Structure formats: C-alpha cells, structure tokens
Amino acid sequence: MMDETGWIQRAREGDVGAFGRLVQTYQTPVYNLACRMLGDRMEAEDAAQETFLRAFRSLNRYDPGRPFLTWLLSIAAHHCIDRLRRRRPALPLDSLPLGSDGEDPEAALERREARERVQQLLMALSPVDRAAVTLRYWYDCSYEEIAGMLDLTVSAVKSRLHRARRRLARTLVETTDEV
C-alpha cells in the first residue's frame, strides 16, 4: 500500500491513477469547503472538480514541506473566492438533504434549518472572510495556515476572523429578534 507521499511523487511523474487516489482521499474536505463557501451543492461539485484539475496541473509547484491537504484547500479557497467575485446576484441556497432513512422527520427538519441558517450567515460575509471562517472553524486550520492559504498576514487573518465573528453574531441577534 502506498502512502500520500508516494502517490504525490507518482502523480508528479504523470501517474493519473496515483492522482486519483489523492482525489479519493481528499474529495470530501475539498467539496465541503466549496459547499460552505459557495452555498450551492452543484456549484460546489464543479468547484471541487476544478480544484483537482488545477492541483494536477500545478503538482510541480507543490512544496512537500507543506501538508498536501493545506495546499489543496488553498487552491479550492482561491477558486471559490474567484467564483464569488464573478457572481452578480447571490445564488439561492440549494435545499440540503433531510437526513438518513428512519430518522425522526422533525429532528431532521430542525437540523436542516439550522444548517441553512448557518449557510445564510456565511453567505453574508465577504468571500475572503467566508474562506477564513470556514478554514478556521470547519477545518481547524491555524492562523498561520490560513494566512498562507489566502495570501494574508497572520494579523490580517486574526482581524478578519474577529470582524466576521462580530458580524455573524450581530446578524444572528438581529434576525432572532425579528422572529
């Protein structure tokens, strides 16, 4: 059985099958990041595919001193930011699945509504702030990793996260008061 380092090396040598193993290993985190940032499952699927295509084309620029997932998420975040900047009006949220078979429908509906609410709050943030929040709180990336992925300074990441948390909290309070 080959490990990640071996797959990367073979993929750099043109082995598409080895790169396929990397895709299988990391497709879920890349898709989840794209879905959180874009708010649309179909668009997230396209963004994830484009991320892997870009990664394959850029394998010669990958620094083995960095974690491969960090490098991939950086490509995905930048691609999603670019897509968001090209958007004119915001796309409507795609409905998320209710849950597994046999699950209490009321609990599944509450969970779906909570996911949609979080997604709506995230969509209110700028693309870069959304990427920073997603990388920090869904992927537990350090400030340094986020700074490297988004081409920011560590202090800029901290500042963006602070402002984003304040905005999310303020928006949550305002919308809760309306209900």
Image: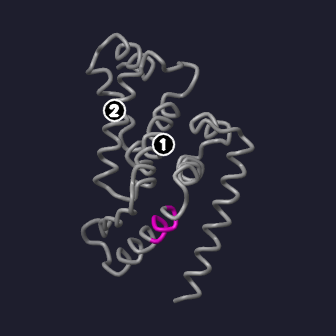
Which residue is at the front of the view, 142 or 86?
86
The residue sitting at 49% across, 28% down in the picture is 68
Q: Which residues are magenta?
A: 117-122
The residue sitting at 66% across, 54% down in the picture is 161
For label 1, count other residues whose C-alpha is less than 10 Å away and answer few (under 14), some (14-19) or many (20+): many
Q: Residue 119, relative to residue 157: is it above or below?
A: below
- Mark 1–mark 2 Cα distance, whole angstroms, equals 16 Å
The x and y percentages for residue 166 are: 68, 66
The three-letter code of the residue at mark 2 reads: Val
Q: Earlier in the sequence, mark 1 or mark 2?
A: 2
For label 2, count other residues whose C-alpha is less than 10 Å away and answer few (under 14), some (14-19) or many (20+): some
Residue 23's tag is 2
The outermost residue toward the front is 88
The outermost residue toward the right is 155
Helix, strand, or loop for circle 1? helix
Q: Residue 81, relative to residue 103: is it above or below?
A: above
Count of picture labels:
2
Quarter residue 99 falls in: bottom left
Which residue is at the front of the view, 99 or 152?
152
